[in-house]
Image (spheres, rainbow, N blue to C red):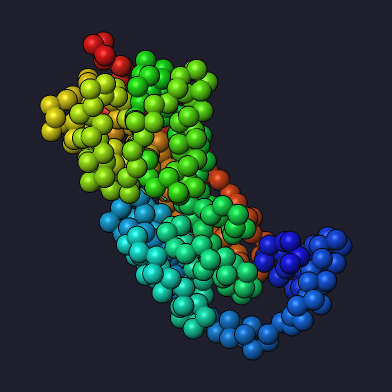
């Protein structure tokens, strides 16, 4: 009602000197209109901390998340907190169950690494003060949640500019679910680069996957069997890129001689596959560390930025090369 975030409301009530006169007035007005009064019992219950933070992730088998969790765990451990992992396995209902651990005092807060959870549930919790919630790796449109992630649009541009510089004009994209804001941003970065070179994107070269090896393999196979097959692939994560490399090998195509492949994430496996994977690096441990710091700051009632983005870096290895002469 006040048109400000829940963090600002808490600040206006607990430390009014830290907010502007205008914000104070808006919050006071909303407090009057709703008849809100701080619930002392709830506050003291909150103080009986569990010293446990729940981290909800979409796929425990994806090594991208192991590195994020290492960063989270490092900061949690040195602050005397434990991390409880909730693998939603892409099932929104499972993710939802973990949310109940906070009101029942089994956890002090939730760090969400996925948007595959009912938006209304997250919005409802975000509106409740006293529900510590941080988002990392991904983000929700229109939700003012403390969030840490990379600049996905710029990251994708780095990959596409690299492929364009090597002469590729027929570039396919195997995206993650396009309803996911980070995938939309990665695709936007892709389109921006083509537009700068006055190239059109042929929609038949866009296929969606679910960030798994098998999605990369299946979609890669379909694209590689087209009559005018693409000469390069941009995949929204490394697992799908590795799937495309296997699809190419199974079809007797050479990477990068016949087809170039670039991934996103820079999981360690990319250094050991054949050929080694060219990819966009995400500072995975840092994302984890920052997310846990944000959570601890929220619990200590310190100011927390609403959104923070980290930089990506193109890692050039062996899976992408010049456009083949024959194409
Ligand atoms: O590999 C999993 C993908 O989902 C990553 O690219 C990451 O950004 C994530 O949220």
Identify whether 327 is placed above or below 157: above
Residue 60 shows in the view? yes
Q: Work out which quarter of the rendered image holds the C terminus and state it.
A: top left
In this picture, residue 245 sits left or right of residue 151? left
Residue drawn at (81%, 77%), measured in percent from left and top? 32
Q: Position of residue 262 (x, y in %)?
A: 33, 32
Residue drawn at (29%, 22%), measured in percent from left and top? 231
In this picture, residue 15 sits left or right of residue 116? right
Q: Position of residue 235 (x, y in %)?
A: 34, 37
Q: Work out which quarter of the rendered image holds the N terminus and state it.
A: bottom right
Q: Residue furthest bottom?
A: 41
Identify whether 309 is placed above or below 55: above
Q: Position of residue 244 (x, y in %)?
A: 24, 36
Residue drawn at (13%, 33%), measured in percent from left and top? 250
Identify whether 16 is placed above or below 186: below
Residue drawn at (81%, 62%), measured in percent from left and top? 23
In this picture, residue 52 sits left or right of residue 307? left
Q: Quadrant of residue 18?
A: bottom right
Q: Quadrant of residue 164?
A: top left
Q: Residue furthest top?
A: 325
Residue 256 shows in the view? no
Q: Nearer the viewer, residue 207 or 69?
A: 207
């Amino acid at each position: 009602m006040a048109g400000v975030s829940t963090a600002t409301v808490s600040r206006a009530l607990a430390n009014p000197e830290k907010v502007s006169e205008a914000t104070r007035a808006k919050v006071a007005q909303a407090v009057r209109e709703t008849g809100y009064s701080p619930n002392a019992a709830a506050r003291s219950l909150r103080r009986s901390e569990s010293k446990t933070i729940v981290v909800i992730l979409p796929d425990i088998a994806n090594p991208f998340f192991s590195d994020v969790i290492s960063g989270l765990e490092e900061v949690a451990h040195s602050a005397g907190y434990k991390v409880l992992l909730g693998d939603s396995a892409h099932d929104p209902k499972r993710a939802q169950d973990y949310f109940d651990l906070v009101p029942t005092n089994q956890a002090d807060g939730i760090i969400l690494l996925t948007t595959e959870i009912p938006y209304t549930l997250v919005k409802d919790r975000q509106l409740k003060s006293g529900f510590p919630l941080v988002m990392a790796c991904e983000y929700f449109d229109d939700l003012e949640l403390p969030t840490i992630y990379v600049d996905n649009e710029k990251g994708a541009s780095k990959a596409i500019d690299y492929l364009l510089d090597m002469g590729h004009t027929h570039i396919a994209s195997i995206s993650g679910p396009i309803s996911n804001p980070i995938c939309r941003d990665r695709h936007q970065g892709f389109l921006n680069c083509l537009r700068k070179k006055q190239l059109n994107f042929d929609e038949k070269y866009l296929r969606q996957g679910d960030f798994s090896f098998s999605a990369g393999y299946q979609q890669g196979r379909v694209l590689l069997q087209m009559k005018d097959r693409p000469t390069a692939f941009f995949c929204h994560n490394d697992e799908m890129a590795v799937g495309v490399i296997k699809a190419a090998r199974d079809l007797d195509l050479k990477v990068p001689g016949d087809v170039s492949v670039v991934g996103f994430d820079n999981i360690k496996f990319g250094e050991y596959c054949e050929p080694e994977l060219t990819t966009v690096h995400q500072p995975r441990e840092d994302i984890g560390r920052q997310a846990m710091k944000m959570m601890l700051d929220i619990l200590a009632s310190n100011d927390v930025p609403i959104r923070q983005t980290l930089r990506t870096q193109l890692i050039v290895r062996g899976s992408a090369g010049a456009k083949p002469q024959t194409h």
